[in-house]
Image: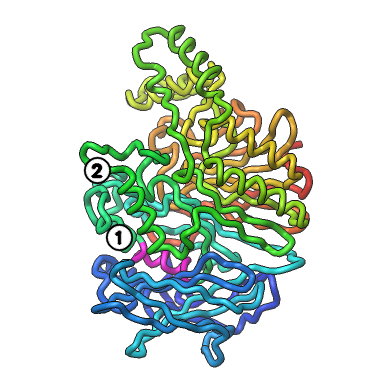
Amino acid sequence: MFKTDSAAQTATQPANPSTNVTRRGVFGLAGATAALAASPAAARGFGTGFTHSVASGEPQATRVLLWTRFVGEADTQLEWQVSASEDFARPVSEGLATASPSRDWCAKAIANGLEPGRWYFYRFIAPDGTSSPVGRTRTLPLGPTGKFRMAVFSCSNYGFGWFNAYAHAAQANDCDLAVHLGDYIYEYGGATYPSPGQKHPDRDLEPQHEIITLADYRLRYATYRADPDLQRIHQVLPMISVWDDHESANDSWKEGAQNHQPETEGSWEARKAIAKRVYREWMPISDEPYAAYDIGDLATLFRIDTRLEGREEQFSLEKLFAGKQTPEAMIASLTAFRDGDYADPERQLLGAAQEQWLFDGLAASSTRGATWQVLVQQVLIGKVSSPTSMMDLLGENVPDFAKRRFTAAAMASKAGLPQNMDAWDGYPAARERLFKASLEADANLVVLAGDTHNAWNFDLAQDGAAVGVEFATCSVSSPGFESYLSMVPPPTIAGALVEENDELLWADTSQRGYMVVELTPTTATSEWRFVAGIKERSTKLAGTKRASVAAGAKRQGA
């Protein structure tokens, strides 16, 4: 079980810090974690004053963004302080921030004038002298950098269970930065995903209906951000985060979404604007749609938007099968699509402006001598076709919806098409442009991805040339393949996927957790950490898996 004693309420500096920082300082949650764990109702009442602890993000070498939420009777001016010591004896940066009902009482500030590669403590102070919980943050290094570690998360669905991945990462206390790759919240109603039979009994969602309005989105974030383990990871690490589809609506693109019906839910542009606004209110993030972060001479992180900025509508295999009664007709339709619309050389996932910004950034990062170029983004870039043997693996007792889905995927595979048109696989020309730009820049490309709820490890190639690697994390709590392929042992599924797909080196299709990605001048390594479960609060791990790529090799496979 998750401990609520004093050891779980404090945090030292990381055991293996990247720079020579003091380890004598400790600080507490001011009782927040223990109180929330003991009283689920506290997560829904919110109250007044400092309601949702603190957070930091958008780190650079000399600055960081600070966040808190303070509910008052009117606009409230808060004082903020940043200190190298937890006693705040000599603040090194301070200023004012306003908590306003116009931004759902969320307040942000930029702390400037900080030293590179250093841990700091920060807090907010209300006019009556009350203080927020104390947070810890870190600036990015400058110059020679020997090591940098990131805790990487994705797909945290509140209703399915506890956020034990956040809890473990905070307790492990061995990273410099948290990275969230999207699906930080889910938009569905309380009885939809999870269904009543899947829902954790202690994880009541607010509001109960699907979120559409400004008030809906704000209440959903307030519910998620009241989770004690989510508060804790924000409190102890700065975060770089990107949205995926569920921060707006399932399978979203720039002009719509699968889970948005204009006839009953209004304008997509209005809903998208609300989703963006509330995300930027509640998250420690800037309003910039994409951004870059230099990790000394070690790496450049590129936070990109594959979802709302420039994505064209996803293709649908189901639509291609409409009216086709025979396998021969289906294959003919898929082949025509593969050689036609699917191959459109102008098709966009990022949008032209973001794409050019990224390509220029890859070249600039390589030119300045950074070892690694890392994409902080949402969806799989590795190629995944469904195993043609999948129907044999499923056996006879398969639900109709699963049979339809995997029949379509198997037919697509026979026609040389991937199984997931919502990933980079659905935008092959955009992926090819990116890979060619990476090769031209001589970049050491590391792609981070989430979205699928499963863990993946790919070598990436273009026309036979090694491009880089992809480390894709499993979910914090959202279910993976095991939820609808329970009739097949997970190792069998993973083995079939690896056998079918040449660039896929390894996959795990049944566990929850997170990744720790470590960058050094010689190696980029991912350690997948799988939690023991999500039905009880716990920081116990079920196991780990590691993979590495050498600088300059651009591939792991022999």
Say left or right for 49 vs 298. left
Counting other residues with Cα less than 10 Å from the Cα at mark 2, is it few (<14), some (14-19), or many (20 or more)? few
Q: Is residue 25 above or below residue 99?
A: below
Residue 38 picture location, percent across and down: 30, 71
Q: Is residue 233 magenta?
A: yes
**Is any part of residue 205 visible from this angle?**
no
Residue 125 picture location, percent across and down: 40, 84
Q: Main secondary structure of the magenta part?
A: helix
- Where does the magenta region start and end? 225-235
Counting other residues with Cα less than 10 Å from the Cα at mark 1, is it few (<14), some (14-19), or many (20 or more)? many
Q: Residue at x 64, y 35 (%)?
A: 433
Q: Is residue 251 above or below residue 517?
A: above
SS category of the residue bearing label 2: loop
**Is any part of residue 217 visible from this angle?**
yes
Numbered disc in front, either 2 or 1:
2
Q: Residue at x 48, y 31 (%)?
A: 420
How far apart are labels 2 and 1 at the CA level?
18 Å
Residue 226 picture location, percent across and down: 34, 66
User: Along the line of sight, which residue is nearer the eye, 221 or 492?
Assistant: 221
- State the residue position of label 2: 266
Labels in figure, total? 2
Q: Residue at x 50, y 51 (%)?
A: 181
- State the residue position of label 1: 218
Say left or right for 97 vs 378. left
User: Along the line of sight, which residue is nearer the eye, 360 or 548?
Assistant: 360
Q: Earlier in the sequence, mark 2 or mark 1?
A: 1
